[in-house]
Image (cartoon, rainbow, N blue to C red):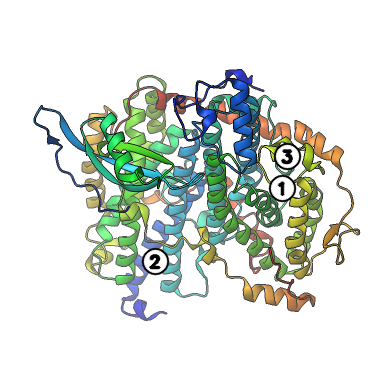
Amino acid sequence: MTATAQDLLPATRNALSLLLLAMADDEFVIGFSDSEWTGIAPLLEEDVAMSSLAQDELGHAQALYRLLAELVDDGRNADAIAFDRPPEGYYHARLLDHPRGDWADTIARRFLYDTADSVRLEALAEGSWPPLADLVGKIRREERYHLLHVGAWFERLAAADGEPRRRLLDALGRLAPDAATVLAPLPDELGLVLAGIADATSDELEARWEARIRPTFERLDLPMPPPARDPGRSRTDHSDAFRWLHGEFTAVRRLDREATW
Amino acid sequence: MTDSPPLDRPATPTPDGHTLEPWEVFRQEKEGDPMRHGGSVMAPDPELAVHYARELFGRRQESVRLWIVRRSDIHDLDDVDLLQPPLDRSFKKPGGYVMRDKLAAARERSGTKKPKARSR
Amino acid sequence: MTDPIALDPVLSPTERSRLPFNEEGRSHDQRFDLFEAHVTGGGKVEAGDWMPDEYRTSVLRFVEMHANSELMGVLPEREWLMRAPTLRRKLALTAKVQDEVGHAQLLYRVAEDLGKPREAMFDDLLAGKTKFHNVFHYPTRSWADVGVIAWLVDAAAIVAQQALRDSSYAPYARTMRKICWEESVHIMHGRDVVVTMVNGTAEQRAMIQEALDRWWGPLMQMHGPRSDRAKDRDIHWRIKAKTSEELRQEFLSIYVPRVWELGLSLPDPELRLDEATGEWGYTEPDWNELRTVVTNHGPKSEERLEFRRLNREQTKWVRDTLLAAPGVAA
């Protein structure tokens, strides 16, 4: 294992690798999914903007997979971890199992995800394991733009009478029940708190997230997302939509996993 | 930009109650060139702003065109996180594609030679 | 096509300009002659200048086709966005397609300032009244196509675009400089994909060769049939500087050696350089195929246009949202 990982207790290493996998898979799946808008977004200028957001997420996923690869040190590189698992082996939150849908679906899903992710990143920003704290610092700086851009669209859709608001409400109706899955408890997360890597458990993070988004939801007269139902299965039992995505992103790689592309 | 970022100071009133405010001047040096920032002038209205811009940036025939814009109409973005985000973006830049070794390997495998350099 | 009389200059006319054809007091014929002398003498034109209808229509047609091609060119590569086999390739391909959309935005903006609204251009494209380049009417069949397109289709395009960097219509010329810089990265990415596969397994090499065999015909047709320089109005107005044949020769002289360098073959037994003349000989491209394809009878023409029509309808509500209420500050 790498020098930095040697400083960690085995139990901490296990909990950390699950956290990294959860975060990396979240960024990978939402990044892949939203990259589908490239070339077909509602406005040319918005097309370029949404594509940047998707690329940023994929860049974050790549950096997180690399860190994970160093940590587990089992011969796999970032691409092997990212691409070479069966659908059941992915650990992303159920919120991201929903397909990209229409523009309202995408904005609703991004708003719910980016606000939750922001709370998660904040809790890791001062952590005791430097490789993760450093990376989280960089990711947070890039995520600022995401919150600005997606937040502006969320407001715009919610505040517009008629079709835009109706579509947003429809989207929230479908997505909000799964919003809290991003911050659902991870196995052995208490160990991460005790090791100083995270500053709070998931329950506390979920409370912070609710407090953070409540003013916006109240001001826009939108129903708050409920707590996660069945939190133990927030990151498993993936959807058909994800299976389709998996089929796509493995299509070329499956031709020859050993080949260099 | 040829001078420091715009300062947030209030416009200066003239004796008869109009306010002087800064106008940024962009100039085109020769035909077909892009507009480049030249500097700024203080003026109470568009007409005088244009006259002063001409004096400051055009009296020597050094420009073929000027754009004069109220500083308060300009939205400034210098946020380093938005303009220089920290993670790797080499896949968007020429430096991200160093191919010398790969090309050499391909030539070796197929027994070909490097194409002659062309003079354009 | 839009009636040229209906195109209004975007900026208001001037009383006294450095350029005499801008002066309101002169007759149309005087202004035409002054304009022609200016442009054929190497002078530049900006969006707010007076232009004869022939010039305005010619530039608009040229820029519009270019913009349409960027927009439609996105579609063949988009299919492979979701299938990129590594994170780096995924990022590079997404960034490339994003750039094409960005180029479409830049070019539609240039065209809009000549007097035709963006929505009218989309209407004409989707109704089949305006055209886009032949290469974007063909299917993609494998990941190898992604490499070949990014390398050689973009290369053929950049050869044309570099020659436009000094176009008489200055907004277009400036846009070409930005586009050329961005396209140069695409070409490197494409070449990297191809070289990587050529250095890989036998199956990967075969995939590349197969893609090359399919794309060579459309590539040879891309710059168009030979035309008489003396009769070419776009050259007369200095909108473009090089003929189709000059562009094709330039493309062949740079890229054929680079393809052969990799041990790949090209499916034209007549393709060779005449050392004495410096000219490349080749089998005459199928100009019937080109005509058929660019009039929207290519293998994927209708499918892609229909895809865009549907996409445009489905996203209309979002554009309407932007046009409705005043913006909420970010």
- Residue for badge 1: C242
x and y percentages locating residue A11 in the rendered image: 33, 71
- Rendered image quadrant of residue C53: top right
Residue A19: percent from the left, percent from the top? 36, 61
Q: Identity of the amino acid at label 2?
A: Ser
For the residue labelled by badge 2, is the local secondary structure a helix, a strand or a loop? helix
Residue pictured at 33% horizontal, 37% vertical = B68
Observer-side mark, 1 or 2, equals: 1
A231 or A48, which is in the foreground? A48
First-in-chain label (3 vs 1): 3
Q: Give the alpha-carbon distance from disc 3 to disc 1, as whole Å.
A: 25 Å
Residue C199 appears in view:
yes
How far is disc 2 from disc 3 in space, using C-alphas?
Answer: 46 Å
The reply to whether residue A241 is visible in this rendering is no
Of the residues shown, which amino acid type is indicated by label 3? His
Q: Nearer the viewer, mark 2 or mark 3?
A: 3
Give how far across and how far down residue A257 sits, in percent: 64, 65
| In this view, B118 is above or below C103 | below
* Quadrant including the C terminus of chain C: top left
Badge 3 is on which residue? Answer: C137
Chain at tag 1: C
Q: Position of residue C229 (x, y in %)?
A: 78, 42
